[in-house]
Amino acid sequence: MAVPAKCFLVTGSPGVGKTTLIARVLETLKSSNPNLKIQGFFTRESRQGGERVGFEVVTLDGRTAPLASVNNSSAESIRWPTVGRYRVNVASFESLALPELQVKEDADLFVIDEVGKMELFSSLFFPAVLRVLESNKLFLATIPAPKAGRDIPAVARLKNHPGATVFSLTKSNRDAMKDQICSQLTDKMV
């Protein structure tokens, strides 16, 4: 059995800056260690005319694929799961995100933004996340804040995983949180 993962989870309200924080942490880590091998993906908003109309998955090397949208009118999209007003394109998500979660020997850090409701519609996603955790590679992910005091079961499982550290992000602690996460990740890399 593998040693417990070095798992860092960032949670907070929607729009508080979890994705921005992860991007800043990666910038800082890469500047101090240019040979750092990082795998994973971000989830970014898609906007039209200032309005959020969906989300897309973005790999660390810049490839993108749709995750969810309000503008799906194909016959196929009628069968897609929904979160609020968004239809989730599970096949598109899996085609880009799952290869990024293949554990490679030379990987130093995995980044997943986010382990949330949309991503968890993929039956293959959470098992891939667990394989990353079991690999004992450094793991940095964003997770949604509990709604009505209750976590999504998969998110609760991550939070309760041995070796997991949860950082609660607020607008007032964003800068300090970046330094704290960078420091802890750097300590684990040694």
Image (cartoon, rainbow, N blue to C red):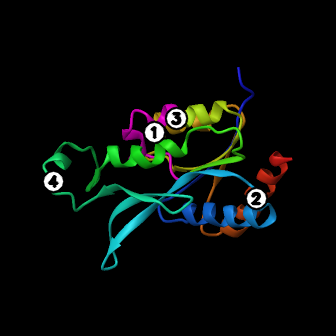
Query: What residue is disc 3 on?
Result: 128
49 or 189: which is nearer to us?
A: 189
Q: For the residues carrying marks 2 and 3, which lies nearer the camera in this image?
A: 3
Query: What residue is disc 1 on?
Result: 152
Marks 2 and 1, how far apart at CA: 27 Å
Element at badge 2? Answer: helix
Question: Circles 3 and 4: CB distance less than 8 Å?
Answer: no
Boundaries of the magenta span:
113-127
Question: Circles 3 and 1: CB distance less than 8 Å?
Answer: no
> Label 4 sits on what residue type?
Ser
Magenta-colored segment: predominant secondary structure? loop
Residue 182 marker: 2
For the point 61% across and 36% down, the residue is 132
Question: Circles 2 and 4: CB distance less than 8 Å?
Answer: no
Marks 4 and 1, how far apart at CA: 29 Å
The image quarter containing residue 72 is bottom left
In this rendering, position of residue 75 left or right of residue 144? left
